[in-house]
Image (spheres, rainbow, N blue to C red):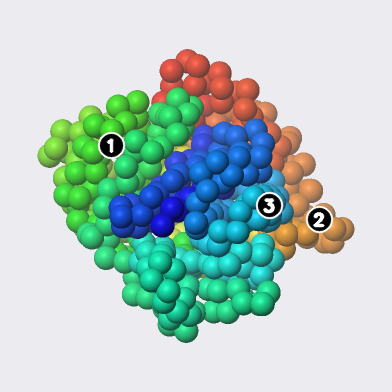
Amino acid sequence: MRIAFVAANREVLPDPVIPLGLLSVLEACPSTHERLFLDLCFEPEPERALRDFVREQKPELVALSLRNLQSADYSDAHSNVQAYARLVAAVREVSEAPVVLGGGGYSLMPEALLERLGADFGVAGEGEVVFPALVEALTTGGDTAEVAGLYRRVEGRAHAPRTMPPFVDLATLKFVSRRRVDRRHYAASGIESVQTKRGCPLHCSYCTYPTIEGHQSRLRPPSHVADELQHIRLEAPEVDHFFVVDSVFNLPRRHALAVSDAIAERGIDLPWTCYANPLGFDGELAEHMVAAGCVGIEVGSDSGSDTVLAKLGKSFDAAAIREAHRVAESAGLLDCHTFLLGTPGETLDEVKRSLDFIVDLAPSAAILMVWNDDAEALVPPSASPRTELRQSILDLLSAQAASQGRWVVPPLGKRFDARRFSLLRRRGLSGPLWQHLG
């Protein structure tokens, strides 16, 4: 079968993101099939590019990966759903090939999106088992209704799977071939993505990781992670930084230690950064991470108020955030903390308390977001007490951010714009751009 794998994500701020998940599904699909790949990230006219690709390549099946339902570039959120609908329509204009939806964004609303976008099939969660099973059913004339984990659209209505597959054993996955990656990703940032585990045991109220990957952490063997980094070095010598895309790298702590040691033992000379949680982040772990080339951590701190942190289901308090900053600073690690202001039930006084907390914390960088109910609902903004609170928060940030040189406020465009990022990259600065605010 001739299969087109299409990455639909087009966000490039602060940096474009390699479609690691889709490429992993491609690698899991047997090589007896012809596997075509198209990344729409840099295409100025994505619908035309997709139509031309499908018209010329004539795939028998089109797999379309939807990374985000809303923009994930830290700016004010907007819906991507209409853009995805146009891509499905573009395929329909030139081909009768079935369309399969997948990706993190699709996994959040699988039945609704399958009906709304008019595709034929959908894969929620991990696709490395489900998608090859669908291909097998289509090529042998099997019943697609028997494919575990597969959503189907029949006569305009979405049907959920009869059964769900087990989670993927990460030790069995093949390395993603970086030769397929559009080299413009590396030219833009030099950053590569690496995953050491899937699943998240935490219970943050707004987070989608457990929905997509499950609550139980499934660990890659540390030696496999080091093997993949060496593999990247061979296939993508342009890479000068890698980012660990686990929901949280340092939980479980023993795995983070083992991965760090495996990287250090191989002598892999690539700087890297990761997401980290204040829990389990101590001086010993920080020392091992630094020895392995880690240069910075990104912490989803969210608030400086213990009351708000508890409402958000966070596993730590403000004192733990302070301790994580102290540990990072002592180890020579840069730390970027993201704060989410104006969450449901939060008052303006609590927001002010968080702003005072951030000033006192003085991390390497702070990214300040403002909760947006309307973006979550995918509808235009409307007047309400919540939107009035949001505007009050934006006014506070506008007045204060100018004097805080390490604050990034994407909703206001403060230290978050394409021109600034382009200037930093032209200076030859690698890794996440928050590291270079100073």
| 2 or 1: mark nearer the eye | 1
Q: Residue at x 30, y 53 (%)?
A: 31
Mark pair 1, 3: CA separation: 38 Å
Q: Amino acid at mark 2?
A: Pro
Residue 360 % position (x, y): 53, 40
Front one among 102 and 418: 102
Q: Residue tagged by mark 1?
A: 232
Residue 212 % position (x, y): 46, 65
Return the residue found at the far left: 265
Neighbour class for label 2 at 10 Å: few (<14), some, many (≥20)?
few
Residue 275 % position (x, y): 40, 48
Q: Amino acid at mark 3?
A: Glu
| 1 or 3: mark nearer the eye | 3
Asked whether the beta carbons under mark 3 and mark 2 sit within 8 Å of each other, the answer is: no
Q: Which mark is residue 93?
A: 3
Q: Is residue 29 left or right of residue 306?
A: left
Q: Residue at x 55, y 41 (%)?
A: 56
SS at circle 1: helix
Q: Is residue 362 above or below residue 76?
A: above
Q: Residue tagged by mark 2?
A: 380
Neighbour class for label 1 at 10 Å: few (<14), some, many (≥20)?
many
SS at circle 2: loop
Front one among 263 and 172: 172
| 3 or 2: mark nearer the eye | 3
Neighbour class for label 3 at 10 Å: few (<14), some, many (≥20)?
few
Q: Residue at x 75, y 52 (%)?
A: 390
Q: Residue at x 66, y 77 (%)?
A: 155
Q: Amino acid at mark 1?
A: Ile
Is residue 38 visible to us here? yes
Q: Is residue 322 left or right of residue 175?
A: right
First reached walking from the N terminus: tag 3 or tag 2? 3
